[in-house]
Amino acid sequence: MWIILAILSALCLGCYDVSKKRSLTANSVVGVLTISVLISSVILFPMWLLSRIYPDMMQQTILYVPQVDLYTHGLIIIKSALVLSSWLCAYIALKHLPLSVVAPMQATRPMWTLIGALFLFSEVLNGWQWAGVVCALGSVLIYSLVERKKDKQEMKGQQTYLVFLIIGILLGSASGLYDKYLMRQYDHNAVQVYYTWYQALMMLIVAGVTRLQRERGMVQTLFAWRWEIIGISVFLVLSDFFYLLALTYPESLIAVVATARRAGTIIPFIYGIVILKEQHPLRKVLCLSGILLGLVCLLIGTL
C-alpha cells in the first residue's frame, strides 16, 4: 500500500512542478511562495478545526489531527525551516532555468536521500540500488559536461541559479531524512498541518522584509496573481499527504519512497519540451532517460 501512496504523491508532485513554473514566469518568487503557502494553510484548516470540535468522529478517519506538545512543535518548526529554505532556493532556480533542466536535477534528490539513509537508518544497498545511483548521477554529470559547450556568457548567467538549485536539492534531501525520523514517532497529519502553518508565518515575515526592500528600490519584480498558484497549493497538499502517510508504514523505506516520488519528474519534463518548446530536447531526453533508468533500478532492487 505504501508504494501506491508514493506513486500517487509522485503524480501530484509532477503537476505541482508545472504549476510552479507557470506561476513563477515573470513573477515574484516571494509573492508566489507566500500566497501558495497561505492557501495551503486554508485548505488544511478544516481538518484541524473538525478534529477539535468532533474529535471522536474524526479519529475514525485518516484526516484526524491530534494535538501535540511544545517539544513536538519545536521539531516541526525545524522541518518548516528546512522545507522553506529548500523551496526558496528551488523557486529562484526554477524562475531562471528551463524546466527541463531543473526537473532532471531535482530527480536526483532521492539519490542523496538514499545515501543519507545508509548512515542514519542503516539501510543497505544491493547491486540494483548501487546501479541506480551510478546511472542517475552519471547521467546528470554527463549532461552538465555537455552543457559546458554552450555559449560561455549563457553558462555564466546560469551558474548562480544552478548553485541555488543544488542547495535546494540538498536541503530537500535532508528534509526527507528528517521526515522519516518524525514519522517514526509523530502523527503525519499533525506534522503536515502545523509545519504548513509555521511556513505561512515565516513567509509572511519574508514577504514583509521584501516589501520594505521594494520600497527602497532593492527589489524590482512585482507580484502578479496567477490561477496556477492555487494548483501549487492543491497539488502540494495532496502530494505531502500521500507522502507522509506512506512513511507511517513500518515496512516503508525512505529511499524507495523518495525515489518513487521523484518519478513524477516526467510530467514537468514533457511540459517543458512539448508546451514550452525548450531548446536541446535530445540532450535532455537522454539525461532524463538515464535518471529514470536509475530510478527503475532502485525500485527493482528494493521490491
Image: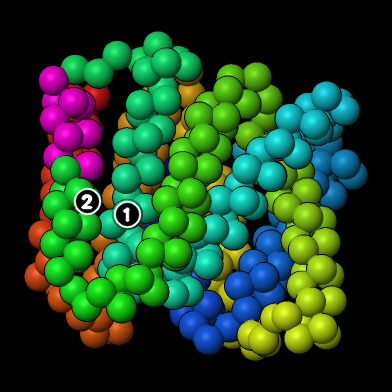
Magenta-colored stretch includes residue 272: no
Q: Give the image location of residue 20, x and y in percent.
A: 50, 70
Q: Of helix, strand and loop, which one carries label 1?
A: helix
Q: Of helix, strand and loop, which one carries label 2?
A: helix
Figure check: 258 above or below 186:
below
Q: Amino acid at mark 1?
A: Met
Q: Relative to residue 110, is residue 72 drawn left or right?
A: right
Q: Give the image location of residue 231, x and y in percent.
A: 54, 71
Identify the residue position indicated by label 1 in the image.
Answer: 105
- Find the magenta span and give its range: 127-137
Q: Could you give the CA–CA distance between mark 1 and mark 2, rounded to whole angstroms?
A: 7 Å
Residue at position x 49%, y 83% in the image: 25
Residue at position x 52%, y 43% in the image: 171
Figure check: 168 above or below 117:
below
Identify the residue position indicated by label 2 in the image.
Answer: 140
Which image quarter: residue 80? Answer: top right
Q: Are marks 1 and 2 in contact (CB under 8 Å)?
A: yes
Q: How many marks?
A: 2
Residue 297 visible from this viewpoint: yes
How are the residues colored?
Answer: rainbow
Q: Give the image location of residue 53, x and y in percent.
A: 90, 44
Q: Amino acid at mark 2?
A: Val
